[in-house]
Image (cartoon, rainbow, N blue to C red):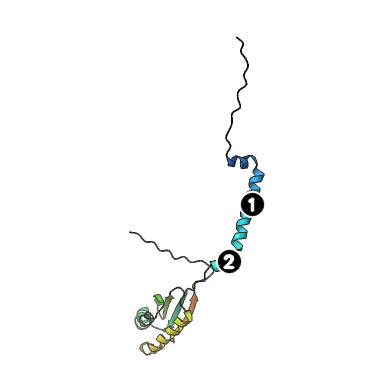
Amino acid sequence: MSIASQEPSPVRVRRSPADVFVTRPVLAAVLSLFIVLLGLRAVFDLPVQQYPRIDASSLVITTVFVGASAEDVQGFVTEPIERAVAQIPDIDYVDSITTAGLSTVRVWLRFDADADAALARVSARLDAIASDLPDDIEPPSIDVQRADRPNATFYISVTSD
């Protein structure tokens, strides 16, 4: 018997599409750069209408009551102002900080509320309660502060059963 030399049959190796990028790293780098550039172009070409403008404002009412303790300022200035402005439409909530001689009431408006209309209503309410406030205080000053600043603010709501 003669033993014939047999060559082993070639084994077919199944290649995945990722093997092309492993064997050709330059192709992988060029394709990745192309995808990044395409993504950057898409980001800068988005129309402005995709980003709605949201007006979020707050009104800050500052009242100085020289020589008064924090308790007196709280009882005679802060609380009457809070009660008066809390009933105005488009108010989300009211908070305050009271220190000796100074009352700061912040009135947070609902999103997309007209800050100018709210300012007029708050001013009219403060004029209406001016006789209820002590005579020794300086007239309350009202500042409009925009909440839609360049720094992003997120409102997150989490609910659970």
Q: Which residue is painted at 64% across and 43% down in the image?
A: 25
Circle 2 sits on which residue? 47
Residue 57: x and y in percent read: 47, 75
Query: Can residue 137 be seen here?
Result: no
What is the C-alpha distance between the residues marked 2 and 1?
A: 24 Å
Could you say where residue 50 lies in the image, as x and y percent from the top left?
Answer: 54, 66
Which tag, 2 or 1, sits closer to the chain's start?
1
Residue beneath label 1, please?
33
- Say which amino acid is labelled 2: Pro
Q: Amino acid at mark 1?
A: Leu
- Circle 2 SS class: loop
Taking the spot 45% from the left edge, 77% from the top edge, the residue there is 113
For the residue pair 10 and 64, the one nearer the viewer reads as 10
- Relative to residue 161, is residue 143 drawn left or right? right
Secondary structure state at the residue bearing disc 1: helix
- Where's residue 10, x and y in %? 61, 27
Q: Quadrant of the C terminus?
A: bottom left
- Would you identify the image quadrant in which residue 12 lies? top right
